[in-house]
């Protein structure tokens, strides 16, 4: 075969675009839509086989959102929110994933999304003012802006248990569930963990399994969801007033969820009135239970009244007093861990085929080929389900080898805990944005409200830069230092740090324990971000590298 003529020889070319977005969940989809609106070219890389982010991966039995459907949805398109019909008060995972796919198709987003592609590394070239992004298969793309839409709860964690590789049965993690239904009929199943995903899945698995063993280290507070089909009347009511309700969630609420803002503290009511208030919240269902009074998360005696109420409810529901006692949390204030929402969780422990195993006093020693051992007792199992959570807030970012200025990696910078300005940028990493990153309300809020706020802020910032011929933005170290201090000060004015929660990174061995999200509230945080922008992006340095002239923010 004769050699290829010089004119026909191929050369390796690196794709270029204005922005690379990592992740095609709700954040990545909306970010792509907004960048297109600015006339910027963007490429989205998604590790999964389709769009949807956390709702693509989390397919465990009973998976559904803990924010009501009419609120857990985009607000950026009036047509979208009017045309989409939710079926239940709390949408199940398949319906939320269908919604994400509908959005991707409706706004023709797929042509700029590359699926089944993991971003392995990103390096900032200071001289060129560009990010070189490398995928796991070795391909590279060059972009001015690098935007992380990797999600806060997307890096599933399986504990390092001795003997796990020798287990002969099936193992599952709630955060990486198979895409085909799993049938537990006739099986002895062990669920390890009692966080949100386990609390949702345990009642469903118990209905199938021959016997279900729930291995609990720390009990969690859970409130009944009171899920039900959405009536046409309620849907019409929401849609007729969507604009006002969305504005309230954005600008008035603490967590981006519509609830009545309480005007008094728990101890201002007498015992009878207070119990009536809690009963109303329990009957109503959902996380709005914590909105009964305005001081439940800042005053321990007030919090104790709510915690005691829920512990009493657990004792009323669970017929075995010893089991009820194990299910009653005592080691953290209610709400200081993400409060769970369930359907018949506590009732499930009244089933004859369900056993609660306390692994705080007798931890799991080893996984056996046919089960596992705690202390001196063996449990025979055909399948193990890990409801052991995620390396939250930072885990998905940490999996990418990100190198900024002066050859400093983000993992090196964040070794003692994440450091950001507004949860949006980290000093030393120009033109790199994080959507709902540590230092922002993120997981303490209705995520879609926070996602839209961040995406809108980033988009407005890029439009502001373009109008001034700027192509580089970076957080200043001084602004970042002050923000980190502020985030911690606000957190320590509450009861949240009293819990060993994933908010603190406490579920990951060796991870620095600092409070990662901003607890000041969605409305307060939005005003701070808007004020920063109104002051010419105070705390950020903007420049025009193409002209090599500084247009630093005032």
Image (spheres, helix red, strand yellow):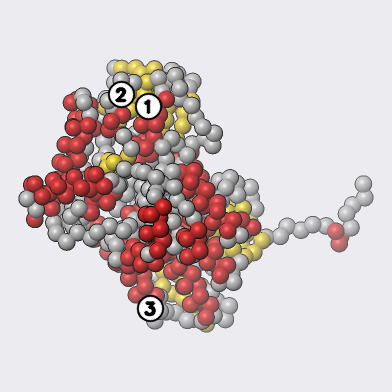
Residue 231 visible in the displayed image: yes
Residue located 55% across and 46% down the image: 48
Disc sitting over residue 206 in the figure: 1
Apparent side of residue 444 relative to residue 132 in the rendered image (left or right): left
- Dividing the image into 4 quarters, which one contains the C terminus? bottom left
Q: Relative to residue 360, is residue 516 depicted above or below?
A: below
Apparent side of residue 47 relative to residue 421 in the rendered image (left or right): right
Q: CA distance from mark 3 to mark 2?
A: 58 Å
Please tell me which residue lies in front, 332 or 308: 308
Please tell me which residue lies in front, 11 or 301: 301
Q: Relative to residue 252, is residue 111 depicted above or below?
A: above
Examine the image and state in which quarter residue 199 appears: top left
Instruction: Single out the residue that lies furthest toward the left.
Output: 270
- Residue highlighted by disc 3: 534
Examine the image and state in which quarter residue 196 appears: top left
Q: CA distance from mark 1 to mark 3?
A: 54 Å
Tag 3 secondary structure: helix
Q: CA distance from mark 1 to mark 2?
A: 8 Å
Where does residue 500 sit, x and y in percent of width and height?
A: 27, 43
- Residue highlighted by disc 2: 351
Q: Are marks 3 and 2 in contact (CB under 8 Å)?
A: no
Where does residue 155 sit, x and y in percent of width and height?
A: 45, 44
């Amino acid at each position: 075969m004769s050699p290829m003529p010089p004119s026909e020889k191929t050369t390796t070319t690196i794709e270029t675009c204005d922005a690379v977005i990592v992740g095609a969940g709700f954040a990545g989809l909306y970010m792509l839509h907004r960048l297109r609106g600015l006339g910027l070219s963007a490429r989205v890389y998604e590790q999964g086989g389709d769009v949807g982010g956390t709702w693509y991966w989390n397919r465990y039995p009973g998976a559904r959102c803990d924010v009501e459907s009419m609120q857990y949805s985009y607000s950026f398109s009036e047509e979208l929110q009017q045309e989409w019909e939710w079926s239940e008060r709390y949408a199940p995972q398949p319906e939320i994933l269908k919604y994400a796919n509908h959005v991707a198709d409706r706004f023709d987003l797929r042509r700029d999304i590359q699926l089944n592609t993991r971003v392995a590394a990103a390096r900032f070239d200071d001289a060129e003012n560009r990010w070189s992004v490398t995928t796991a298969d070795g391909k590279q793309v060059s972009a001015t802006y690098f935007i992380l839409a990797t999600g806060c709860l997307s890096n599933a964690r399986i504990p390092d248990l001795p003997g796990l590789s020798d287990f002969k049965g099936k193992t599952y993690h709630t955060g990486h569930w198979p895409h085909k239904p799993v049938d537990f009929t006739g099986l002895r199943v062990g669920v390890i963990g009692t966080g949100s995903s386990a609390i949702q899945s345990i009642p469903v698995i118990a209905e199938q399994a021959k016997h279900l063993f729930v291995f609990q280290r720390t009990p969690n507070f859970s409130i009944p969801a009171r899920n039900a089909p959405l009536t046409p009347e309620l849907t019409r009511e929401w849609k007729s007033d969507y604009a006002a309700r969305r504005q309230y969630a954005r600008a008035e609420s603490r967590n981006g969820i519509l609830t009545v803002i309480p005007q008094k503290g728990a101890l201002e009511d007498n015992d009878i009135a207070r119990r009536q208030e809690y009963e109303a919240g329990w009957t109503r269902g959902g996380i709005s239970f914590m909105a009964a009074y305005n001081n439940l998360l800042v005053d321990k005696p007030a919090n104790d009244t709510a915690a005691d109420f829920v512990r009493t409810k657990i004792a009323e529901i669970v017929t075995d007093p010893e089991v009820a006692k194990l299910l009653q949390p005592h080691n953290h204030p209610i709400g200081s861990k993400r409060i769970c929402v369930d359907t018949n969780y506590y009732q499930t422990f009244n089933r004859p085929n369900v056993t609660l195993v306390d692994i705080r006093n007798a931890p799991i020693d080893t996984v056996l080929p046919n089960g596992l051992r705690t202390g001196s007792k063996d449990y025979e199992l055909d399948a193990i389900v890990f409801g052991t959570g995620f390396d939250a807030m930072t885990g998905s970012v940490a999996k990418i080898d990100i190198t900024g200025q002066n050859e400093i990696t983000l993992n090196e910078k964040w070794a003692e805990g994440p450091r950001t300005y507004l949860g949006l940028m980290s000093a030393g990493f120009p033109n790199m944005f994080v959507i709902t990153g540590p230092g922002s309300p993120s997981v303490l809020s209705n995520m879609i409200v926070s996602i839209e706020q961040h995406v809108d802020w980033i988009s407005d910032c890029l439009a502001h830069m373009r109008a001034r011929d700027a192509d580089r933005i970076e957080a200043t170290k001084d602004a970042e230092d002050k923000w980190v201090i502020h985030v911690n000060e606000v957190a320590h004015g509450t009861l949240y740090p009293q819990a060993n929660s994933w908010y603190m990174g406490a579920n990951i061995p060796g991870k620095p324990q600092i409070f990662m999200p901003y607890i000041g509230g969605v409305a307060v945080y939005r005003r701070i971000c808007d004020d920063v922008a109104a002051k010419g992006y105070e705390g950020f340095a903007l420049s025009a590298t193409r002209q090599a002239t500084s247009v630093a923010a005032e």
